[in-house]
């Protein structure tokens, strides 16, 4: 009996102990230690140049993280910066309190980087530099009056000197005297032409280009009227703004444009278009009579086809145009590609400009000025690439290419009025933000809920930053110089021009996403400089705009849209060696 007396409590203890371990349903114990786990451990970038850094990021749970070599403390989801001097494999070890551990590795490769040379020929003499490349379009759907201060401040900060009005395809619907559009199009009630002049053109001291309505008359039942265009430039002159350019219609080579002349309507007809440009009653004569100092232009599309739009219009309207206007959108929505936009798109534009020059020599008047009236990335529905560093690098190279090509004027599509979330937001495109837009400056409160991270009215996108930096080089009275790159000609791009006070401006790009590029800069016949300044906007600065830590997404919801960085290097001997950070544009002024 005694034995039974003592065994019963023991059995109860064993049973209770098992119950505590298994739970009432016999499942696993909630008090057991969950083993540590690693979801991912990555290096970004995976390949770097000497002196550059990479970010190691581990995502893990249920333990303490240490990265070796270096014994670096790791927090899940937070990047740790490393600057190895050789190819290094890093190990993330996550250890639980029980002592159990798991590991993962990531390798940072030390790439072999060629030191490229950039040679500027100070004896060369290219096209004259003109600040007419520093332009944007503005459109009648964005409130110019309510947003006046933001617009003016943004234009001044970015160096914008040119504007095109009233905005793209709306031009062939818009009637300036009534501030209305055919086909129930929208024009903001504040955007009368008188307000455009008094609230934007005059206070910002802008050079103005207008687009005459070729597509519709004021009754919206027929094609555009030369008399309306003539009255418009006359009113502009009377208001104190003589338009430097007026183009007959917008993209009339395309079926997407309003054209009530043709049957069926909106059918491109180059013969008919040219016939309305020429003659005593044509657009050219009407506009020139009203404003002799206004240049009159025609639409072209660089089709380079015998019997095509350019062939017929250039030939048939010869003698009745002072310039040609060309538009360039190299991407289709949904098909954007960062490598293409950063490394090829700007150079393909130069190819098209050369096509126009050859067309003019063959069918029109050689050396006719070329105006790039609209330019962007995709031709519709821009996505996050449009507000990423990638489009900024494209825009910067476009400005350099057009300067070298001797283009007479350029206006980006568009200054304000176009942010949305409907474009391509694919993770295959670089960018932290979940919005995009044609506009290169933030629309501010007008964006509503679509683009809350775009900043206050006038905040600069990377594309606007390209204009801001380029304004240091794009100075009237200066001359393009020949800049030659040897070495990594895929990633290193260079443009050069004289600069005030006997200085040289050098516009340098690193088109490599991950590797810094060392460059050696030579100015022919010059062995020293009294002063060198470098202003840089790059991927790292763009990333800071998405997060105070530089690791998007922003954990606290504050988008700073950080500005470029200017470094004063003082006196330097030449050749000068610089290291161009990954995906960067750099304005170098050498005294």
Image: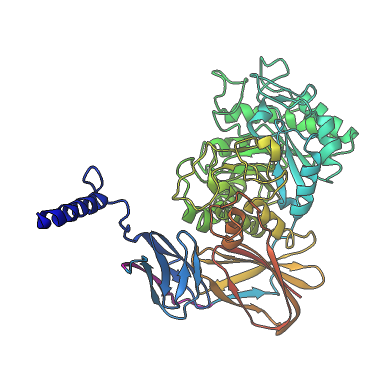
In this image, 542 relative to 228: left or right? left
In this image, 163 relative to 97: left or right? right
Work out which quarter of the rendered image holds the C terminus and state it. Answer: bottom right
Question: Can residue 314 be seen here?
Answer: no
Question: Can residue 341 be seen here?
Answer: yes
Residue at 57% of width from left, 58% of height from top? 543
In this image, 81 relative to 247: left or right? left
Q: How far across and down, in percent of the image, does residue 416 sit?
A: 69, 40
Q: Nearer the viewer, residue 132 or 462?
A: 462
Magenta residues (range): 100-115
Q: Is residue 55 magenta?
A: no
Q: Nearer the viewer, residue 423 or 228?
A: 423
Please tell me in which quadrant of the rendered image residue 207 appears. Answer: top right
Work out which quarter of the rendered image holds the N terminus and state it. Answer: bottom left
Residue at 60% of width from left, 49% of height from top? 557
Q: How far across and down, in percent of the image, does residue 120 sit?
A: 65, 74
């Amino acid at each position: 009996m005694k034995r039974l007396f003592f065994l019963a409590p023991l059995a109860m203890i064993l049973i209770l102990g098992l119950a505590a371990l298994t739970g009432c349903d016999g499942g696993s114990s909630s008090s057991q230690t969950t083993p540590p786990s690693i979801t991912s451990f990555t290096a970004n970038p995976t390949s770097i140049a000497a002196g550059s850094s990479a970010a190691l990021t581990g995502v893990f749970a249920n333990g303490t993280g240490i990265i070796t070599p270096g014994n670096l403390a790791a927090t899940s989801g937070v990047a740790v910066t490393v600057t190895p001097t050789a190819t290094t494999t890093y190990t993330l070890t996550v250890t639980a309190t029980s002592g159990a551990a798991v590991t993962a590795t990531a390798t940072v490769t030390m790439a072999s980087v060629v030191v490229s040379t950039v040679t500027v020929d100070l004896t060369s003499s290219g096209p004259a530099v003109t600040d007419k490349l520093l332009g944007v379009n503005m459109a009648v759907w964005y409130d110019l009056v309510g947003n006046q201060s933001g617009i003016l401040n943004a234009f001044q900060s970015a160096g914008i000197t040119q504007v095109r009005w009233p905005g793209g395809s709306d031009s062939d619907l818009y009637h300036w005297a009534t501030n209305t559009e055919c086909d129930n199009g929208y024009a903001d009630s504040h955007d009368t032409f008188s307000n455009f002049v008094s609230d934007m053109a005059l206070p910002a001291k802008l050079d103005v280009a207008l687009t005459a309505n070729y597509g519709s008359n004021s009754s919206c039942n027929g094609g555009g009227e030369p008399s309306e265009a003539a009255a418009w430039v006359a009113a502009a002159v009377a208001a104190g703004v003589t338009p430097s350019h007026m183009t007959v219609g917008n993209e009339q080579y395309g079926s997407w444009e309003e054209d009530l002349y043709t049957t069926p309507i909106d059918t491109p007809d180059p013969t008919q278009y040219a016939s309305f440009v020429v003659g005593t009653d044509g657009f050219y004569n009407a506009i020139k009579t009203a404003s002799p100092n206004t240049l009159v232009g025609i639409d072209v599309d660089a089709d380079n086809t015998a019997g095509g739009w350019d062939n017929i219009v250039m030939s048939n309207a010869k003698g009745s145009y002072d310039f040609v206007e060309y538009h360039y959108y190299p991407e289709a929505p949904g098909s954007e590609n960062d490598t293409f936009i950063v490394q090829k798109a700007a150079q393909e534009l130069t190819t098209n400009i050369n096509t126009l020059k050859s067309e003019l020599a063959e069918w029109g008047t050689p050396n006719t000025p070329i105006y790039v009236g609209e330019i962007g990335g995709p031709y519709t529905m821009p996505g996050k690439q449009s507000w990423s560093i990638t489009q900024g690098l494209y825009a910067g190279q476009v400005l350099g290419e057009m300067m070298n090509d001797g283009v007479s004027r350029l206006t980006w599509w568009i200054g304000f009025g176009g942010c949305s979330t409907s474009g391509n937001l694919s993770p295959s495109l670089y960018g932290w933000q979940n919005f995009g837009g044609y506009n290169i400056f933030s629309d501010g409160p007008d964006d509503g809920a679509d683009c809350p991270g775009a900043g206050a009215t006038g905040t600069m996108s990377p594309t606007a930053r390209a204009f801001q930096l380029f304004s240091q080089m794009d100075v009237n009275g200066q001359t393009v110089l020949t800049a030659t790159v040897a070495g990594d000609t895929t990633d290193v791009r260079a443009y050069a021009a004289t600069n005030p006070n006997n200085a040289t401006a050098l516009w340098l790009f690193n088109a490599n996403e991950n590797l810094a590029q060392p460059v050696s800069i030579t100015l022919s016949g010059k062995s020293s400089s009294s002063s060198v300044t470098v202003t840089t906007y790059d991927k790292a600065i763009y990333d800071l705009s998405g997060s105070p830590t530089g690791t998007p997404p922003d954990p606290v919801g504050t988008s700073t849209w950080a500005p470029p960085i200017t470094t004063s290097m003082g006196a330097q001997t030449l050749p000068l060696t610089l290291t161009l950070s990954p995906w960067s544009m750099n304005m170098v002024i050498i005294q």
